[in-house]
Amino acid sequence: MTVVALLSVAPVIEDSMAGEVAKAVDALEAYDVTYETNPMGTVIEAETTDELFAAAQAAHDAVDADRVSTVLKIDDKRTRDVDASAKVDVVEEHLGRPATNRES
């Protein structure tokens, strides 16, 4: 089984959040997950929800701030194994093109 999630962890501060967000992303390295960070969060793939929740907890705990905002959205497909890139591939098949308007 592959569990796919979107994780967003950020301190609630007025200054740049980049340093604290980097700490959250770095905390994922200690877990058996794959991840890719984008401007809106980090897509994480894990074999189990236990591993996913542990990684998300570590990312949340890594942020050193008085107030931390964490959002976790999970797609737990239990009857078949589909990774995040396969989801994008299917959308691109329907589009007949890459799912971006950015130049490569």
Image (cartoon, rainbow, N blue to C red):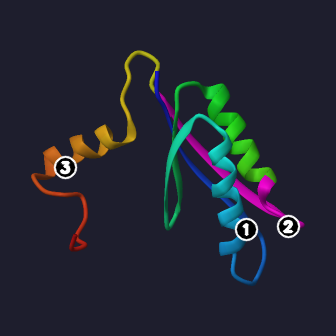
Placement of the C terminus among the 4 image quadrants:
bottom left
Q: CA distance from mark 2 to mark 1?
A: 8 Å
Badge 1 marks a residue whose secondary structure is helix
Percent of width and height locating residue 52:
62, 35
State yes or no: discs 3 and 1 in contact (Cβ < 8 Å).
no
**What's the amino acid at mark 2?**
Ala
Farthest-out residue, left:
96
- Mark 3 or mark 1: name the one nearer the start of the chain: 1
**What's the amino acid at mark 1?**
Glu
To which residue does mark 2 refer? 65
In the image, the segment drawn in magenta is: 62-76
Query: Is 64 colored magenta in this rendering?
Result: yes
Q: Look at 46% across and 27% down and name the residue there.
A: 2
- Mark 2 or mark 3: name the one nearer the start of the chain: 2
Q: Is residue 100 left or right of residue 81?
A: left
Farthest-out residue, top:
79
Percent of width and height locating residue 1:
46, 21
State yes or no: discs 2 and 1 in contact (Cβ < 8 Å).
yes
Farthest-out residue, right:
66
Q: CA distance from mark 2 to mark 3?
A: 39 Å
Percent of width and height locating residue 100:
25, 64
Q: Look at 38% across and 23% down and name the residue there.
A: 81
- Main secondary structure of the magenta stretch: strand
Res 80 quadrant in image: top left
To which residue does mark 1 refer? 20
